[in-house]
Amino acid sequence: MTHWPISDVVEEMPPGLWIRRGAPPPMFSMHRHDDVEINLVLDGQLHYLFGGQPLTIREGEIAVFWAAQPHGLVGSRAGDMCWVHVPFSMFLSWGLPESQTAPLLSAQPLITHAPELARRIAHMAERWGEEVGGSEPGGGTPDGAGDEDSAAIAQLEIQAAMRRILRASSRANPEAPTDGGGSVPAARLRQVSAMAQYVRDHHRSPIAVADIAASVHLTPSHAMTVFRRTAGVTLGDYVTMCRVAEAQRLLLTTSMKVTEIAEVAGFGSLSSFYEHVSAACGMTPREYRRQGR
């Protein structure tokens, strides 16, 4: 399973259960999708921009994150990788403990060094891709896909793999804060997912907390509390992340003027654009563009 979609498909990847194994795609694509993504680095390294911040996933590491955060693969040391995308609705149906789901849904990926576990999951993933019919973008069914019973078994194995990853992470980070052993209410996670979707759809225009809250029928104060406690960042921070990610994409993939990018990405002023993009990139927008090219 080394088939990779063309760049425009990667950037607009619809939610769906799918698996990839092989070398990373040679492209830059800042994108977002409503899945939980598992990255297994068996050999080499992956270099991402994640929520506007640089991130490297090294050999032997497993990274799990809610892919609603803007992210893009900006470089790699070619090697053997495996990606598993789990639809957010499927992830919610598992009813995992809040102590595990809260870190996973935060602003940064959950990264665990577990080479043996990574190899074992990647080996199983080759069969999952055949059984669930997810070796094409968006969950299309390839020739030779398994029957419904095989797909159901594969999904149970994927859930078990996720639980093993989260358990390994909790053992590796015993001091990480937890919220107890109860389950996150599915309704709350759906609200957070819907608010994140609203921000992704509207961040290029002026957007207020009241607008986001109204999209899920909550008061502004309640919406802010629910989002921060579940996603690990404030609504304001998430809006900024989306705008920074859009600005980075435009800086690297278009010849638009910096002033135009600031407006198109949703920043209310040029000074705000420079402040947030410079903080995320560690350099001015123009320097970032020059370095990227």
Image (cartoon, rainbow, N blue to C red):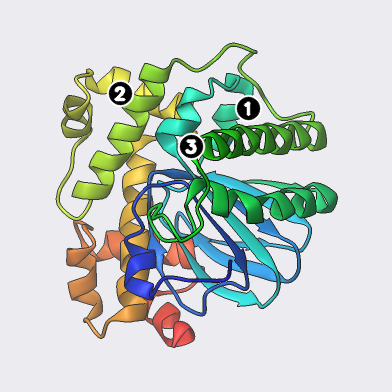
Instruction: Answer yes or no: is residue 111 visible.
Output: yes
Across and down, in percent, residue 161 comes to 68, 38
| Residue at (35% x, 26% y) in the render | 190
Residue 275 falls left or right of residue 203: right
Label number found at residue 223: 2
What residue type is disc 3 on? Glu
User: Residue beneath label 3, please?
Assistant: 148
Residue shown at 56%/28% (left/top)?
101
- For disc 1, the marked residue is 100
Compared to residue 224, the image places residue 266 above or below, namely below
Q: Mark 3 or mark 2, which is nearer the start of the sequence?
A: 3
Residue 93 location, x and y as percent?
A: 47, 24
Left or right: 155 with respect to 281?
right
- Residue 274 seen in the figure: no
Report x, y in % for residue 234. Answer: 40, 35
Total count of labels: 3
Query: Where is residue 9, by image quadrant?
Result: bottom left
Image-based side of 169 in relation to 138, left or right: right
Badge 2 marks a residue whose secondary structure is helix
Q: Earlier in the sequence, mark 1 or mark 2?
A: 1
In depth, the one of 90 and 133 nearer the eye is: 133
Whichever of labels 1 and 3 marks the residue nearer the N terminus, that label is 1
Residue 231 place in picture, x, y as percent: 46, 33
Task: Please identify the quarter of the rendering in which residue 171 is found.
Answer: top right
